[in-house]
Image (cartoon, rainbow, N blue to C red):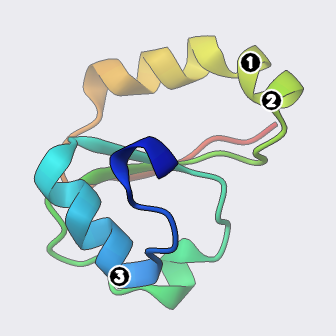
Amino acid sequence: MQGARWSGIKNGELLALAETNFEVFLTADQNLRYQQNLAGRAIAIIELPTNTLSVVTTLVPEILNELTTIQPGNYIRIKK
């Protein structure tokens, strides 16, 4: 998030910062759930299968559907 001056912020610090500014965190980091303690997080997380724009655009309907029901602390994996 270079526009927000978040470039270079990583891992738990990024999640904590995102949590104070957003309700949902979209990520293509497939290891996030293994690398971070997500228990008690107030932010909902949606894991995408890739960050390839051409693939992500095909997933927009599914992402939008998840956004209608996702709750704080939820972790949702979207598969190809």
Type of amino acid under label 3: Gly
Q: Is residue 50 visible?
A: yes
Badge number at residue 27: none
Residue where numbered disc 2 is placed: 53
Q: Is residue 1 visible?
A: no
N-terminal of the pair, mark 3 or mark 2, is 3
Q: CA distance from mark 1 to mark 3?
A: 27 Å
Residue 1 locus on image (x, y percent): 47, 49
The number of numbered discs placed on residues in the rendered structure image is 3
Q: Is residue 22 left or right of residue 53?
A: left
Type of amino acid under label 1: Thr
Where does the C terminus fall, quadrant-wise?
Answer: top right
Q: Residues within 10 Å of mark 1 (few under 14, many from 20)?
A: few
In this rendering, is residue 23 above or below 56? below
Residue 56 locus on image (x, y percent): 74, 28
Q: Is residue 20 left or right of residue 63?
A: left
Residue 22 locus on image (x, y percent): 22, 43
Contact, mark 1 vs mark 2 (Cβ under 8 Å): yes
**Which residue occupies the foreground of this view, 74 or 45?**
45
Q: CA distance from mark 3 to mark 2?
A: 25 Å
Identify the residue at image location x=36%, y=70%. 14
Type of amino acid under label 2: Leu
Residue where numbered disc 3 is placed: 12
Contact, mark 3 vs mark 2 (Cβ under 8 Å): no
N-terminal of the pair, mark 1 or mark 3, is 3
Residue where numbered disc 1 is placed: 57
In this rendering, is residue 54 above or below 28? above
